[in-house]
Image (cartoon, rainbow, N blue to C red):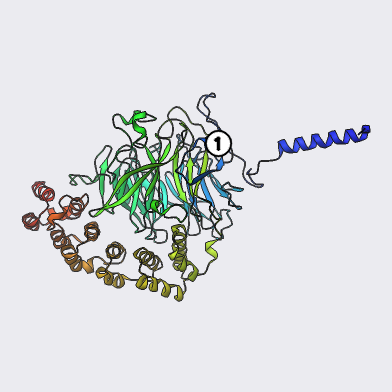
């Protein structure tokens, strides 16, 4: 067909237009209009040091048969992802840390919200919530805003109306957090089942924590270990001390917490009041005498110098290396049931995700080796966080850089990836804002198989109760679940909700000390410490339980509670605990009982001598004698 000059020109113009459009339209997942511009950051690694593309990295990943991995987000849409959280609307929040490893008083670290509205495993909407962070290492939404780790401050950024726009300037809730530790800083914010905000802290620089203006002698020192902060009572506590650089914390179906760590032991069972082994330095109590080991009964590397344990062939079958970050106890409803209540963690040196089985062992738990779950097969892969979402799939963050402790040759600030892992032909979850549900609907979610719903619903009920707004029908339903449900994990969920909502008292918990289930008895003991004289009023009952209860887990909760009791009330309880000769080889009970009774010994050496005569735990007998002889 012969074209006129005018027709030919029109076709050429259209072709040019389509070419321009095809080449210049923003990508499907580009930043949304109105967001702050991308930070102007500079890579400090050599220009020729570059990662493979996110798409190429995705193609190299291997996972067990039946699983699928998608690239949820990659650079330039996400960079330097150091922490993640899934909110009550099913959206993924990501902290981008551009300031590592140089602390400055101000910065441009960001909190970014990603949405996958069509649920294809790839985000399709992005919004920047905040872009003024300095050394941003952890965060969690909740209680009308977002809680943020920006050393030396624990910040609260208010957003009461939930419109994803801060209502005002960040509020400093606590200060005194060390910022000279480089990668050993406070991190990993998570809501515990007891309604407290939990976090980790590293070893290389000590923190001295308190509300702004608190005198030094009234602050709470913490070097390495786990801490918690109550969001409405504004109380700060050190939960346990020791390890090296804990970076990842999660809970199993029974509310037992586990955290990951680098260098010395990769997994630890969190026991309130524990004093764990340290990489170096002195424990806060010089009379601890002996420190508690990790609950991991294996290594993920072949030994030798830990600095060289990266990418070695001899480490591969064992898990790839010693440096770990992130922790996710899988409690979703998409993956096969064999993975439920096992823990997943990033292995920085091994470029993979390790999986450990959590097994009851004596009074606590031991972790046992399971086959690696996710291999990136990419020496830039640095998994720092794992989170489960409302569809039961899990997000995996990749800091994407070289070196250990994130990096020691320079920082590649313009890279980062988020992957999503699902099993089978997954049906999209019905996304909804859980905050719009009624109290009764939130209670019903305590029966959901996916703990994502349980956790958010529990926190929302606690928030409403703290504002004086929770229905009597919801409380009645929680009491019904606790009393009538045959599943102990559902009973625990109801108990945690009742506690967080202020719907029970010390008398209620005292009645549960005779509950038929060991986990309920154990949690009743743990929660009693939060009520005025809750433990002190029950010291005689605790002594009887310490003597008669056949559950080592319950005895461990009693040993942990010793540290919260008046010194004079500890003797009878400790004597009952130390009469159990069968606990002599337990990983936890001898030392936890010792930590509880040690402060009382110099106050009454006659009682200590009497205890020495009845103690059936050889190691504790030695400790008692040694402490009696100490100045």
Q: Looking at the figure, which quarter contains the N terminus?
A: top right
* Towards the viewer: 153 or 114: 114
User: How many numbered discs sit on the rendered protein?
Assistant: 1
* Towards the viewer: 567 or 123: 123
- The quadrant where residue 448 appears: bottom left
Q: At x 17% / y 44%, what residue is drawn?
A: 289
Helix, strand or loop status at disc 1: helix
Q: Position of residue 602 (x, y in %)?
A: 12, 53
Q: At x 45% / y 46%, what residue is drawn?
A: 386
Q: Is residue 215 visible?
A: no
Specify whether 573 is left or right of 389.
left
Specify whether 576 is left or right of 557.
left
Q: Position of residue 9 (x, y in %)?
A: 88, 33
* Towards the viewer: 446 or 60: 60
Q: Mark 1 packing: few (<14 Cα in 10 Å), some, or many (20+)?
A: some
Q: Position of residue 316 (x, y in %)?
A: 37, 33
Q: Position of residue 368 (x, y in %)?
A: 30, 45
Q: Is residue 15 visible?
A: yes
Residue behind mark 1: 54
């Amino acid at each position: 067909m012969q074209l006129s000059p005018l027709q030919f020109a029109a076709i050429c113009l259209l072709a040019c237009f389509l070419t321009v459009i095809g080449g210049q339209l923003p990508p499907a997942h580009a930043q949304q209009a109105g967001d702050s511009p991308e930070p102007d950051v500079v890579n400090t690694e050599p220009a020729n040091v570059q990662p493979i593309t996110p798409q190429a990295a995705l193609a190299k990943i291997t996972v067990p048969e039946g699983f699928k991995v998608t690239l949820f987000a990659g650079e330039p849409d996400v960079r330097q992802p150091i922490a993640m959280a899934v909110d009550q609307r099913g959206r993924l929040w990501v902290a981008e840390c551009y300031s590592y490893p140089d602390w400055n008083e101000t910065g441009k670290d960001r909190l970014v919200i990603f949405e996958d509205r069509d649920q294809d495993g790839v985000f399709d909407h992005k919004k920047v919530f905040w872009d003024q962070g300095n050394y941003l290492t952890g965060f969690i939404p909740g209680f009308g805003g977002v809680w943020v780790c920006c050393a030396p401050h624990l910040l609260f950024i208010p957003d009461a109306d939930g419109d994803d726009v801060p209502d005002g300037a960040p509020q400093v809730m606590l200060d005194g957090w060390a910022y000279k530790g480089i990668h050993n800083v406070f991190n990993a914010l998570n809501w515990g089942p007891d309604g407290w905000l939990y976090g980790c802290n590293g070893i290389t620089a000590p923190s001295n924590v308190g509300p702004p203006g608190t005198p030094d002698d009234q602050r709470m020192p913490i070097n390495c270990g786990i801490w918690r902060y109550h969001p409405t009572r504004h109380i700060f506590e050190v939960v346990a001390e020791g390890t090296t650089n804990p970076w990842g914390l999660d809970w199993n179906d029974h509310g037992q917490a586990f955290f990951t760590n680098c260098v010395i032991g990769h997994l630890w069972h969190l026991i309130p009041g524990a004093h764990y082994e340290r990489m170096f330095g002195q424990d806060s109590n010089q009379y601890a005498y002996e420190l508690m080991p990790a609950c991991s009964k294996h290594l993920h590397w072949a030994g030798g110098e830990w600095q060289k344990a990266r990418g070695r062939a001899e480490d591969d079958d064992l898990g790839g290396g010693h440096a770990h970050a992130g922790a996710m106890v899988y409690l979703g409803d998409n993956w096969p049931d064999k993975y439920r209540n096992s823990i997943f963690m990033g292995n920085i040196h091994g470029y993979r995700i390790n999986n450990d089985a959590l097994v009851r062992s004596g009074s606590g738990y031991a972790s046992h080796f399971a086959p690696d779950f996710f291999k990136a097969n990419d020496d830039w892969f640095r998994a720092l966080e794992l989170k489960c979402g409302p569809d039961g799939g899990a997000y995996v963050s990749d800091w994407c850089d070289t070196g250990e402790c994130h990096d020691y040759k320079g920082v590649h600030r313009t890279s980062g990836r988020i992957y999503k892992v699902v099993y089978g032909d997954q049906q999209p979850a019905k996304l909804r804002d859980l905050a719009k549900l009624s109290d009764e609907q939130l209670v019903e979610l305590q029966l959901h198989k996916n703990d994502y719903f349980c956790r958010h619903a529990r926190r929302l009920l606690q928030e409403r109760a703290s504002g004086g707004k929770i229905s009597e029908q919801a409380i009645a339903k929680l009491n019904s679940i606790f009393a009538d449900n045959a599943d102990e994990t559902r009973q625990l969920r109801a108990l945690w909700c009742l506690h967080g909502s202020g719907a029970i008292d010390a008398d209620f918990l005292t009645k549960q000390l005779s509950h038929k289930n060991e986990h309920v008895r154990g949690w009743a003991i743990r929660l009693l410490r939060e009520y005025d004289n809750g433990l002190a009023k029950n010291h005689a009952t605790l002594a009887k339980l310490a003597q008669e209860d056949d559950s080592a887990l319950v005895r461990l909760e009693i040993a942990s509670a010793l540290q919260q009791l008046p010194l004079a009330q500890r003797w009878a309880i400790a004597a009952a605990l130390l009469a159990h000769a069968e606990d002599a080889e337990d990983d936890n009970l001898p030392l936890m009982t010792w930590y509880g009774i040690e402060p009382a010994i110099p106050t009454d050496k006659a009682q200590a001598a009497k205890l020495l005569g009845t103690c059936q735990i050889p190691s504790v007998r030695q400790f008692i004698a040694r402490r009696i002889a100490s100045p």
